[in-house]
Amino acid sequence: MNEIVQDLERIRSQFLSDLDALQTSKELEDLRIAYLGKKGMLTSVLKGMGKLSKEERPAVGKLANEVRELLNDRLDEVKQRLLDQELEKQLQSEVIDVTIPGIRPPRGAAHPIEQTIDLICRVFVGMGYTIAEGPEVELVANNFDRLNIPASHPSRDEGDTFYITDQVCLRTQTSPVQIRVLEKQEPPIRIVCPGKVYRPDTPDATHSPIFHQIEGLVVDRGVSMSDLVGTLKLFARELFGENTEIRLRPHHFPFTEPSCEVDVTCWKCGGKGCSTCKGEGFVEVLGAGMVHPKVLSGTGIDPEEFSGFAFGIGVERTAMARFNIDDIRNLYENNMRFLMQFK
Protein backbone atom coordinates (compact mmCIF):
# COMPACT_ATOMS: atom_id res chain seq x y z
CA MET A 1 0.00 0.00 0.00
CA ASN A 2 2.74 2.45 1.00
CA GLU A 3 4.47 1.84 -2.35
CA ILE A 4 1.34 2.70 -4.40
CA VAL A 5 0.67 5.79 -2.29
CA GLN A 6 4.22 6.94 -2.81
CA ASP A 7 3.88 6.37 -6.57
CA LEU A 8 0.67 8.41 -6.67
CA GLU A 9 2.25 11.27 -4.73
CA ARG A 10 5.27 11.17 -7.02
CA ILE A 11 3.05 11.24 -10.10
CA ARG A 12 1.16 14.24 -8.76
CA SER A 13 4.31 16.15 -7.96
CA GLN A 14 6.06 15.29 -11.25
CA PHE A 15 2.93 16.10 -13.28
CA LEU A 16 2.66 19.59 -11.74
CA SER A 17 6.32 20.19 -12.49
CA ASP A 18 6.01 18.99 -16.09
CA LEU A 19 2.85 21.04 -16.57
CA ASP A 20 4.60 24.31 -15.71
CA ALA A 21 7.18 23.70 -18.46
CA LEU A 22 4.62 23.32 -21.29
CA GLN A 23 4.74 25.78 -24.22
CA THR A 24 2.34 24.39 -26.84
CA SER A 25 -0.94 22.49 -27.04
CA LYS A 26 0.92 19.62 -28.74
CA GLU A 27 3.23 19.27 -25.71
CA LEU A 28 0.14 19.28 -23.52
CA GLU A 29 -1.38 16.38 -25.48
CA ASP A 30 1.87 14.44 -25.22
CA LEU A 31 1.83 15.01 -21.43
CA ARG A 32 -1.78 13.78 -21.17
CA ILE A 33 -0.88 10.57 -22.98
CA ALA A 34 2.23 10.08 -20.81
CA TYR A 35 0.17 10.20 -17.60
CA LEU A 36 -3.38 9.15 -18.52
CA GLY A 37 -2.95 7.12 -21.71
CA LYS A 38 -3.38 3.34 -21.87
CA LYS A 39 0.29 2.93 -21.05
CA GLY A 40 0.54 6.08 -18.95
CA MET A 41 2.18 6.34 -15.54
CA LEU A 42 -1.08 6.73 -13.58
CA THR A 43 -2.72 3.89 -15.49
CA SER A 44 0.21 1.60 -14.73
CA VAL A 45 0.02 2.38 -11.01
CA LEU A 46 -3.70 1.79 -10.81
CA LYS A 47 -3.29 -1.65 -12.35
CA GLY A 48 -1.47 -2.64 -9.14
CA MET A 49 -4.51 -1.89 -6.95
CA GLY A 50 -5.75 -5.42 -7.48
CA LYS A 51 -3.03 -6.66 -5.15
CA LEU A 52 -4.30 -4.55 -2.23
CA SER A 53 -6.43 -5.96 0.57
CA LYS A 54 -10.07 -4.99 0.97
CA GLU A 55 -9.16 -2.75 3.88
CA GLU A 56 -6.49 -0.85 1.91
CA ARG A 57 -8.42 -0.29 -1.31
CA PRO A 58 -10.82 2.48 -0.14
CA ALA A 59 -8.08 4.81 1.05
CA VAL A 60 -5.83 4.17 -1.92
CA GLY A 61 -8.78 4.42 -4.34
CA LYS A 62 -9.77 7.78 -2.88
CA LEU A 63 -6.22 9.09 -3.34
CA ALA A 64 -6.06 7.71 -6.89
CA ASN A 65 -9.34 9.48 -7.81
CA GLU A 66 -8.04 12.73 -6.33
CA VAL A 67 -4.87 12.48 -8.40
CA ARG A 68 -6.81 11.63 -11.61
CA GLU A 69 -9.23 14.55 -11.08
CA LEU A 70 -6.32 16.90 -10.41
CA LEU A 71 -4.60 15.82 -13.62
CA ASN A 72 -7.76 16.20 -15.71
CA ASP A 73 -8.70 19.58 -14.22
CA ARG A 74 -5.23 21.04 -14.64
CA LEU A 75 -4.98 19.68 -18.19
CA ASP A 76 -8.25 21.40 -19.13
CA GLU A 77 -7.15 24.69 -17.58
CA VAL A 78 -3.77 24.72 -19.28
CA LYS A 79 -5.28 23.56 -22.59
CA GLN A 80 -7.58 26.57 -22.76
CA ARG A 81 -4.77 28.93 -21.76
CA LEU A 82 -2.42 27.55 -24.41
CA LEU A 83 -5.13 27.70 -27.11
CA ASP A 84 -5.82 31.34 -26.26
CA GLN A 85 -2.11 32.14 -26.42
CA GLU A 86 -1.69 30.37 -29.77
CA LEU A 87 -4.74 32.14 -31.21
CA GLU A 88 -3.43 35.53 -30.08
CA LYS A 89 -0.04 34.74 -31.59
CA GLN A 90 -1.68 33.69 -34.85
CA LEU A 91 -3.79 36.84 -35.00
CA GLN A 92 -0.72 39.01 -34.48
CA SER A 93 1.28 37.18 -37.15
CA GLU A 94 -1.56 37.26 -39.70
CA VAL A 95 -2.57 40.88 -39.43
CA ILE A 96 -4.17 42.17 -42.64
CA ASP A 97 -3.84 45.80 -43.59
CA VAL A 98 -7.28 46.51 -45.02
CA THR A 99 -6.07 49.87 -46.31
CA ILE A 100 -3.76 48.27 -48.87
CA PRO A 101 -5.38 48.23 -52.34
CA GLY A 102 -6.47 44.77 -53.43
CA ILE A 103 -5.33 42.96 -56.53
CA ARG A 104 -7.97 43.47 -59.17
CA PRO A 105 -8.57 40.48 -61.47
CA PRO A 106 -8.39 41.33 -65.16
CA ARG A 107 -11.75 42.39 -66.54
CA GLY A 108 -13.18 40.72 -69.59
CA ALA A 109 -15.45 42.25 -72.19
CA ALA A 110 -18.36 41.22 -74.36
CA HIS A 111 -17.40 39.72 -77.71
CA PRO A 112 -17.85 42.17 -80.62
CA ILE A 113 -20.67 39.99 -81.95
CA GLU A 114 -22.46 40.14 -78.59
CA GLN A 115 -21.84 43.88 -78.38
CA THR A 116 -23.42 44.33 -81.80
CA ILE A 117 -26.43 42.15 -80.99
CA ASP A 118 -26.95 44.03 -77.73
CA LEU A 119 -26.72 47.41 -79.45
CA ILE A 120 -29.15 46.49 -82.24
CA CYS A 121 -31.65 44.98 -79.81
CA ARG A 122 -31.45 48.04 -77.54
CA VAL A 123 -32.21 50.31 -80.52
CA PHE A 124 -35.37 48.36 -81.38
CA VAL A 125 -36.43 47.80 -77.77
CA GLY A 126 -36.29 51.59 -77.46
CA MET A 127 -38.80 51.72 -80.31
CA GLY A 128 -41.21 49.41 -78.48
CA TYR A 129 -40.12 46.04 -79.86
CA THR A 130 -39.80 42.89 -77.77
CA ILE A 131 -37.20 40.15 -78.20
CA ALA A 132 -38.35 36.72 -79.42
CA GLU A 133 -36.25 33.55 -79.64
CA GLY A 134 -36.71 30.10 -81.10
CA PRO A 135 -34.90 26.77 -81.66
CA GLU A 136 -31.86 26.51 -83.88
CA VAL A 137 -32.94 23.01 -84.96
CA GLU A 138 -36.09 23.79 -86.89
CA LEU A 139 -38.85 22.13 -88.91
CA VAL A 140 -38.33 22.39 -92.64
CA ALA A 141 -41.93 23.58 -92.88
CA ASN A 142 -41.21 26.58 -90.64
CA ASN A 143 -37.88 27.31 -92.28
CA PHE A 144 -39.18 27.18 -95.86
CA ASP A 145 -42.78 26.18 -96.60
CA ARG A 146 -44.57 28.61 -94.31
CA LEU A 147 -42.30 31.40 -95.47
CA ASN A 148 -43.59 30.95 -99.02
CA ILE A 149 -40.30 29.45 -100.20
CA PRO A 150 -41.13 26.92 -102.95
CA ALA A 151 -39.61 23.43 -103.16
CA SER A 152 -37.67 24.51 -106.26
CA HIS A 153 -35.94 27.41 -104.54
CA PRO A 154 -32.09 27.09 -104.59
CA SER A 155 -31.84 27.74 -100.84
CA ARG A 156 -33.52 24.37 -100.21
CA ASP A 157 -30.75 22.40 -101.91
CA GLU A 158 -28.55 20.24 -99.73
CA GLY A 159 -25.64 22.41 -100.74
CA ASP A 160 -27.29 25.42 -99.08
CA THR A 161 -28.96 23.89 -96.01
CA PHE A 162 -27.87 21.48 -93.25
CA TYR A 163 -30.57 18.79 -93.17
CA ILE A 164 -30.93 16.48 -90.18
CA THR A 165 -33.88 14.58 -91.67
CA ASP A 166 -36.26 15.29 -94.54
CA GLN A 167 -38.44 17.22 -92.08
CA VAL A 168 -35.82 18.81 -89.82
CA CYS A 169 -32.88 21.11 -90.53
CA LEU A 170 -30.59 23.68 -88.91
CA ARG A 171 -32.34 26.98 -89.49
CA THR A 172 -30.88 29.05 -92.30
CA GLN A 173 -32.43 32.28 -90.97
CA THR A 174 -34.23 33.47 -87.85
CA SER A 175 -37.47 33.93 -89.83
CA PRO A 176 -38.97 30.71 -88.38
CA VAL A 177 -39.17 32.56 -85.05
CA GLN A 178 -41.52 35.03 -86.76
CA ILE A 179 -43.73 32.12 -87.89
CA ARG A 180 -43.91 30.77 -84.33
CA VAL A 181 -44.87 34.21 -82.98
CA LEU A 182 -47.48 34.80 -85.70
CA GLU A 183 -49.09 31.45 -84.79
CA LYS A 184 -49.36 32.19 -81.08
CA GLN A 185 -49.80 35.96 -80.82
CA GLU A 186 -52.53 38.14 -82.23
CA PRO A 187 -51.58 41.51 -83.78
CA PRO A 188 -50.29 44.04 -83.01
CA ILE A 189 -46.88 42.35 -83.17
CA ARG A 190 -43.54 44.13 -82.93
CA ILE A 191 -40.55 41.81 -82.39
CA VAL A 192 -36.86 41.33 -83.14
CA CYS A 193 -35.38 37.83 -83.33
CA PRO A 194 -31.62 37.51 -82.70
CA GLY A 195 -29.80 34.19 -83.00
CA LYS A 196 -27.42 31.82 -84.75
CA VAL A 197 -28.13 30.48 -88.22
CA TYR A 198 -26.40 27.84 -90.31
CA ARG A 199 -25.54 27.49 -93.99
CA PRO A 200 -22.91 25.21 -95.59
CA ASP A 201 -20.67 28.03 -96.78
CA THR A 202 -16.93 27.57 -97.22
CA PRO A 203 -15.17 29.80 -94.65
CA ASP A 204 -13.40 32.79 -96.14
CA ALA A 205 -12.98 36.49 -95.34
CA THR A 206 -16.72 37.19 -95.70
CA HIS A 207 -18.44 33.79 -95.20
CA SER A 208 -18.91 31.35 -92.32
CA PRO A 209 -21.09 28.25 -91.95
CA ILE A 210 -22.29 29.62 -88.59
CA PHE A 211 -23.25 33.25 -88.24
CA HIS A 212 -25.84 35.49 -86.57
CA GLN A 213 -28.92 37.34 -87.75
CA ILE A 214 -31.40 39.71 -86.20
CA GLU A 215 -34.75 39.79 -87.94
CA GLY A 216 -37.60 42.13 -87.18
CA LEU A 217 -41.34 41.87 -87.71
CA VAL A 218 -44.19 44.34 -87.36
CA VAL A 219 -47.81 43.35 -88.01
CA ASP A 220 -50.78 45.62 -87.36
CA ARG A 221 -53.60 47.38 -89.11
CA GLY A 222 -52.51 49.97 -91.65
CA VAL A 223 -48.76 49.19 -91.68
CA SER A 224 -47.20 50.53 -94.88
CA MET A 225 -43.89 50.74 -96.73
CA SER A 226 -43.39 54.25 -95.39
CA ASP A 227 -43.43 52.82 -91.84
CA LEU A 228 -40.65 50.44 -92.84
CA VAL A 229 -38.57 53.24 -94.36
CA GLY A 230 -38.98 55.44 -91.29
CA THR A 231 -38.03 52.58 -88.96
CA LEU A 232 -34.93 51.66 -90.93
CA LYS A 233 -33.83 55.26 -91.21
CA LEU A 234 -34.07 55.70 -87.43
CA PHE A 235 -32.23 52.42 -86.89
CA ALA A 236 -29.42 53.37 -89.30
CA ARG A 237 -28.86 56.72 -87.62
CA GLU A 238 -28.80 55.15 -84.16
CA LEU A 239 -26.28 52.54 -85.28
CA PHE A 240 -24.03 54.36 -87.75
CA GLY A 241 -24.43 58.05 -86.87
CA GLU A 242 -27.01 60.80 -87.09
CA ASN A 243 -25.98 61.86 -90.61
CA THR A 244 -26.54 58.37 -92.05
CA GLU A 245 -28.95 58.05 -94.96
CA ILE A 246 -30.51 54.87 -96.35
CA ARG A 247 -31.10 53.72 -99.90
CA LEU A 248 -33.62 51.06 -100.98
CA ARG A 249 -33.05 48.90 -104.06
CA PRO A 250 -35.73 46.57 -105.49
CA HIS A 251 -35.11 42.92 -104.75
CA HIS A 252 -36.99 39.64 -104.36
CA PHE A 253 -37.57 37.61 -101.20
CA PRO A 254 -40.27 34.90 -101.25
CA PHE A 255 -41.63 35.95 -97.85
CA THR A 256 -42.00 39.69 -98.58
CA GLU A 257 -43.73 41.61 -101.37
CA PRO A 258 -42.53 44.16 -102.32
CA SER A 259 -38.95 43.46 -101.23
CA CYS A 260 -35.81 45.56 -101.12
CA GLU A 261 -32.13 45.60 -100.27
CA VAL A 262 -31.21 48.41 -97.88
CA ASP A 263 -27.94 50.34 -98.11
CA VAL A 264 -26.61 52.91 -95.67
CA THR A 265 -24.17 55.78 -96.11
CA CYS A 266 -20.64 54.41 -96.03
CA TRP A 267 -19.37 54.78 -92.45
CA LYS A 268 -15.78 55.16 -93.63
CA CYS A 269 -16.05 57.93 -96.23
CA GLY A 270 -19.41 59.45 -95.29
CA GLY A 271 -20.80 58.85 -98.79
CA LYS A 272 -17.93 60.34 -100.80
CA GLY A 273 -16.76 57.00 -102.20
CA CYS A 274 -13.90 54.77 -101.03
CA SER A 275 -12.57 51.22 -101.18
CA THR A 276 -15.01 50.05 -98.50
CA CYS A 277 -18.09 51.09 -100.51
CA LYS A 278 -16.33 50.50 -103.85
CA GLY A 279 -16.82 54.13 -104.78
CA GLU A 280 -20.62 54.08 -104.42
CA GLY A 281 -20.92 55.96 -101.14
CA PHE A 282 -23.36 53.32 -99.80
CA VAL A 283 -22.93 49.86 -98.25
CA GLU A 284 -25.56 47.11 -98.19
CA VAL A 285 -26.52 46.12 -94.62
CA LEU A 286 -29.89 44.34 -94.69
CA GLY A 287 -32.88 43.07 -96.62
CA ALA A 288 -36.48 44.06 -95.96
CA GLY A 289 -39.99 44.25 -97.36
CA MET A 290 -43.70 44.03 -96.68
CA VAL A 291 -44.80 40.65 -95.27
CA HIS A 292 -46.24 38.48 -98.04
CA PRO A 293 -50.02 37.91 -97.69
CA LYS A 294 -49.48 34.13 -97.97
CA VAL A 295 -47.23 34.19 -94.90
CA LEU A 296 -49.90 36.01 -92.90
CA SER A 297 -52.78 33.81 -94.04
CA GLY A 298 -50.72 30.67 -93.44
CA THR A 299 -50.47 31.56 -89.75
CA GLY A 300 -54.15 32.43 -89.38
CA ILE A 301 -53.90 36.21 -89.79
CA ASP A 302 -56.23 37.88 -92.28
CA PRO A 303 -54.09 39.81 -94.83
CA GLU A 304 -57.15 41.88 -95.76
CA GLU A 305 -57.28 43.26 -92.23
CA PHE A 306 -53.60 43.28 -91.23
CA SER A 307 -50.35 44.11 -92.96
CA GLY A 308 -46.74 44.22 -91.83
CA PHE A 309 -43.09 44.56 -92.67
CA ALA A 310 -40.01 42.47 -91.93
CA PHE A 311 -36.28 42.97 -92.14
CA GLY A 312 -33.13 40.94 -91.58
CA ILE A 313 -29.74 42.22 -90.42
CA GLY A 314 -26.45 40.32 -90.64
CA VAL A 315 -24.76 40.75 -87.26
CA GLU A 316 -21.24 39.83 -88.41
CA ARG A 317 -21.41 42.22 -91.35
CA THR A 318 -22.60 45.00 -89.05
CA ALA A 319 -19.89 44.23 -86.48
CA MET A 320 -17.23 44.25 -89.19
CA ALA A 321 -18.48 47.63 -90.33
CA ARG A 322 -18.63 49.18 -86.86
CA PHE A 323 -15.21 47.88 -85.77
CA ASN A 324 -13.47 48.05 -89.16
CA ILE A 325 -12.77 44.29 -89.24
CA ASP A 326 -11.72 42.99 -92.66
CA ASP A 327 -11.98 39.21 -92.09
CA ILE A 328 -14.98 37.47 -90.52
CA ARG A 329 -12.77 34.61 -89.34
CA ASN A 330 -11.18 36.92 -86.79
CA LEU A 331 -14.49 36.90 -84.93
CA TYR A 332 -14.34 33.14 -84.32
CA GLU A 333 -10.67 32.35 -83.68
CA ASN A 334 -10.66 33.44 -80.00
CA ASN A 335 -7.40 35.35 -80.42
CA MET A 336 -7.17 37.32 -77.17
CA ARG A 337 -4.91 39.97 -78.69
CA PHE A 338 -7.60 40.63 -81.26
CA LEU A 339 -10.56 40.51 -78.88
CA MET A 340 -8.98 42.75 -76.23
CA GLN A 341 -9.23 45.64 -78.70
CA PHE A 342 -12.97 45.76 -78.11
CA LYS A 343 -13.05 46.17 -74.32
Image: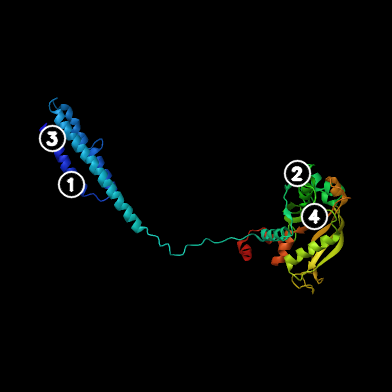
Where residue 180 sits in the image (x, y, percent)?
77, 46
- Amino acid carrying label 4: it is Val
Q: Residue 164, which numbered label?
A: 2
Kindly indicate whether the residue at mark 3 contacts the one at mark 2 (C-beta within 8 angstroms): no
Where residue 228 sits in the image (x, y, percent)?
82, 60
The first of marks 2 and 4 along the sequence is 2
Kindly indicate whether the residue at mark 3 contacts the one at mark 4 (C-beta within 8 angstroms): no
The first of marks 1 and 2 along the sequence is 1
- Amino acid carrying label 2: it is Ile
Secondary structure, mark 1, is helix
Circle 4 sits on which residue? 218
Q: CA distance from mark 3 to mark 1?
A: 19 Å
Question: For mark 1, does the 10 Å Cα neighbourhood hold few (<14), some (14 to 19), or many (20 or more) residues?
Answer: few
Circle 1 sits on which residue? 17
- Front residue of this view, candidates 258 and 326: 258
Q: Which residue appears at 76% of the width and 65% of the height? A: 236
Q: Give the foreground label among 1 and 2.
A: 1
Q: CA distance from mark 2 to mark 4?
A: 31 Å
Q: Residue furthest left?
A: 2
Secondary structure, mark 4, is strand
The first of marks 4 and 3 along the sequence is 3
- Amino acid carrying label 3: it is Val
Q: Residue furthest bottom?
A: 272
Secondary structure, mark 2, is loop
Quadrant the C terminus occupies: bottom right
Q: CA distance from mark 4 to mark 3?
A: 104 Å
Question: For mark 2, does the 10 Å Cα neighbourhood hold few (<14), some (14 to 19), or many (20 or more) residues?
Answer: few
Circle 3 sits on which residue? 5
Question: For mark 3, does the 10 Å Cα neighbourhood hold few (<14), some (14 to 19), or many (20 or more) residues?
Answer: some
Secondary structure, mark 3, is helix
Q: Residue furthest top?
A: 54
Where residue 328 sits in the image (x, y, percent)?
71, 61
